[in-house]
């Protein structure tokens, strides 16, 4: 059995989002912090990497949110890591809440890169699990989309001068807000006591997303059910190259009591033309 590494962190008031619970990006930050501690155990501390020009480069992710959390929740991140043949690190992580229930599960990849080459850590256990199989398919040719220009600020990059995963998540989150503001109208949330919870999703990274650049966010709906829908986004660079894709599950809930509910009819009427 592979070794499980544990690290405990606590949520704070500034971790709450507009849905009144801990934001999804906090879980990724906690998971990243735990990954850094695991790498330290294998001889790759942040200090060593920075002093020897080694970069931590994030990869694709599958995430599920299972139990919402609030302020001052003591969370334990349980991490397993495997080394793949090309040096890619496969991380399987669970974030457990104070009640012992899983709040989040994250499977993600990353690489340690120096001079353009992946570093292999021979002490890591070899892959004994099947990596998640992504289900994202290309945007249909004649799909109705909403397109937004977005500038990626330099202030979002980390100590390795690249975008950490939570900053990439932020781009997609911004795209969702821009879509809903333009197509649905955010006032509909208060008028119908309805919001949507991000229940999980897939993020595939194809090429680096560079700070200080302009990108296009393409947004549409893959499918729609009674109480949930699956939102799709692509990020393109200024030349039209596909950099990253996301597919996420959004669950309709009552804003006042956080319980699942049917989608408001007014919402469906506004977004119907963007469904595949």
Image: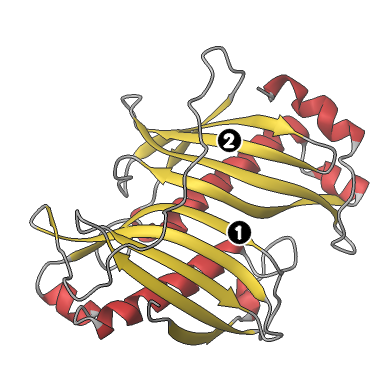
Q: Is residue 248 above or below residue 104?
A: above
Apparent side of residue 11 relative to residue 266 in the rendered image (left or right): left
Front disc: 1 or 2: 1
Q: Residues at badges 1 and 2 in contact (C-beta under 8 Å)?
A: no
Residue 66, horizontal then vertical, whole percent: 68, 65
Residue nearest the observer in this picture, 210 or 165: 165
What number of labels is visible? Answer: 2
Please give the residue where the numbered disc 1 appears in the rendered image.
64
Determine the image quadrant of residue 124: bottom left
Closer to the N terminus: mark 1 or mark 2?
1
**Image point (83%, 47%), residue name:** 189
Q: Quadrant of the C terminus?
A: top right
Q: Secondary structure at mark 2?
A: strand
Q: Is residue 167 above or below residue 49?
A: above
Apparent side of residue 174 relative to residue 268 in the rendered image (left or right): left
Please give the residue where the numbered disc 2 appears in the rendered image.
232
Determine the image quadrant of residue 142: top right
Q: Is residue 43 above or below residue 130?
A: below
Residue 82, horizontal then vertical, whole percent: 32, 67
As measured in the structure, the alpha-carbon distance from the residue carrying label 1 to the one carrying label 2 is 16 Å
Q: Local crowd at mark 2 within 10 Å, few (<14), some, or many (≥20)?
A: many
Apparent side of residue 56 relative to residue 225 in the rendered image (left or right): left
Residue 6 visible, this orientation: yes
**Image point (91%, 46%), residue name:** 191
Residue at the far top: name it. 142
Residue 119, horizontal then vertical, whole percent: 14, 63
**Image point (44%, 75%), residue name:** 79
């Amino acid at each position: 059995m592979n070794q499980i590494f544990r690290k405990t962190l606590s949520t704070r008031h500034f971790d709450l989002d507009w849905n009144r619970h801990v934001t999804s990006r906090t879980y990724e930050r906690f998971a990243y912090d735990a990954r850094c501690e695991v790498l330290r155990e294998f001889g790759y501390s942040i200090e060593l990497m920075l002093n020897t020009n080694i970069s931590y480069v994030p990869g694709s992710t599958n995430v599920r949110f299972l139990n919402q959390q609030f302020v001052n929740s003591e969370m334990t991140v349980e991490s397993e890591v495997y080394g793949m043949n090309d040096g890619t690190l496969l991380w399987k992580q669970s974030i457990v809440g104070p009640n012992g229930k899983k709040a989040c599960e994250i499977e993600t990849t990353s690489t340690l890169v120096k001079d353009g080459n992946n570093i292999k850590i021979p002490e890591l256990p070899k892959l004994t699990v099947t990596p998640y199989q992504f289900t994202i398919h290309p945007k249909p040719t004649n799909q109705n989309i909403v397109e937004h220009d977005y500038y990626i600020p330099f202030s979002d990059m980390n100590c390795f001068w690249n975008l950490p995963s939570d900053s990439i998540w932020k781009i997609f989150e911004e795209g969702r807000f821009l879509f809903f503001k333009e197509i649905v109208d955010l006032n509909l949330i208060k008028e119908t006591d309805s919001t949507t919870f991000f229940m999980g999703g897939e993020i595939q990274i194809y090429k680096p997303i560079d700070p200080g650049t302009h990108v296009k966010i393409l947004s549409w709906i893959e499918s729609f059910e009674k109480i949930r829908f699956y939102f799709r986004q692509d990020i393109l660079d200024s030349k039209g190259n596909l950099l990253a894709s996301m597919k996420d599950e959004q669950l309709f809930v009552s804003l006042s009591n956080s319980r699942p509910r049917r989608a408001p009819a007014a919402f469906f009427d506004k977004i119907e033309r963007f469904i595949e």
